[in-house]
Amino acid sequence: MSDVVRVEELCRTFRTGAIEVQAVRGVSFSIEEGAMVAIMGPSGSGKTTLMNMLGCLDRPTGGHYFLGGDDVAKKSDDALAAIRNRRIGFIFQNYNLLPALNALENVELPLVYRGMAAGERHLVATQVLAEVGLGELISFRPYELSGGQQQRVGIARALAGKPNLLLADEPTGNLDSASGEEILNLFLALNAAGRTVIIVTHDEQVALHCERIIRLKDGAVLSDRPVAADSRRMRGDLGTRAVVQ
Ligand code: ADP
Ligand code: MG
């Protein structure tokens, strides 16, 4: 198996006036294709900063990030935007949906940026919304949907570009436990279908369904361990209940 993601001594320092915050300081790890990895750590430990760099939403101030073997630091902003659009699906805690657009239009948006024709866009967006179990709700606006449904739209939007790498920053953080479990099921099914999933979570139950947990503290890796197979015994059961093939 090849590495989808490899970071070496990755750093991100924020400077505001005289104050310097080393949000990520020298993080190294590799993630193999098809893996499902949890990133955990207390608030302020650098999880979002790290995920934003992995998602090419932000650039490191030090170290290296290789995405599928490509050195991200050597890419122009336009090339990074294209990578984001085609190779990475990013899922946010607060869904980040545009309130004026319905579910279908929200999912179509990354395909608009890609220059896909309206007919094809419509077809792809309808298909991914059906895959996440929202086939009936495609014309609903975000405010007409529950939190769990909004997050499904967020996942459908991430899937629309057919990326191999899914990055989710506390995707169940705003959800009640039943909706959170549905979203976890969806990620397990997406991973079972071959996608690499990196998920930031505060929830030990979510993390225990992953193969590996990377724990951060003060911007550095505190531990990086596989999850014992017996802790994952529920995985198969949950996976078969999910909708995505
Ligand atoms: P987490 O997601 O683990 O809660 P973050 O990555 O959001 O942590 O933040 C890590 C540290 O970096 C915190 O001290 C935070 O205040 C700081 N930080 C994050 N983003 C910025 C920014 N844009 N400017 C300045 N400091 C930031
Ligand atoms: Mg965060």
Image: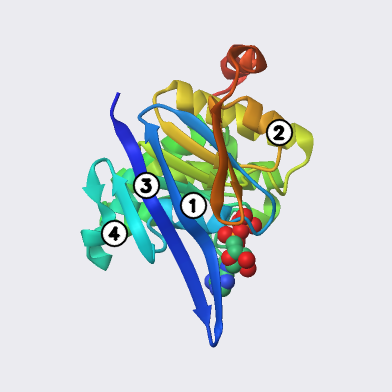
Locate residue 237, reporting x and y percent.
Answer: 63, 12
Residue 207 higher or lower than 94, as above or below: above
Mark number displayed over residue 80: 4
Q: Amino acid at mark 3?
A: Val
Q: Hey, which residue is sitting farthest bottom in the picture?
A: 17
Q: Amino acid at mark 2?
A: Glu
Q: CA distance from mark 3 to mark 2?
A: 24 Å
Residue 58 higher or lower than 157, as above or below: below
Q: CA distance from mark 4 to mark 1?
A: 15 Å
Q: If you read the primary sequence from the N terminus, does the residue marked by circle 4 or circle 3 appear first?
A: 3
One can see residue 161 in this view: no
| Residue at the spot of label 1 | 51
Mark number displayed over residue 204: 2
Q: If you read the primary sequence from the N terminus, does the residue marked by circle 2 or circle 4 appear first?
A: 4
Q: Nearer the viewer, residue 152 or 122?
A: 152
- Tell me whether the residue at label 1 lies in contact with that at label 2, contact meaning CB atoms closer than 8 angstroms: no
| Residue at the spot of label 3 | 7
Estimate how packed mark 1 is, as few (under 14), some (14 to 19) or many (20 or more) residues with alpha carbons within 10 Å: many
Q: If you read the primary sequence from the N terminus, does the residue marked by circle 3 or circle 2 appear first?
A: 3
Residue 17 higher or lower than 198, as above or below: below
Q: Is residue 96 left or right of residue 11?
A: right
Locate residue 56, reporting x and y percent.
Answer: 37, 57
Q: If you read the primary sequence from the N terminus, does the residue marked by circle 1 or circle 3 appear first?
A: 3
Mark number displayed over residue 41: none
Q: Amino acid at mark 4?
A: Leu
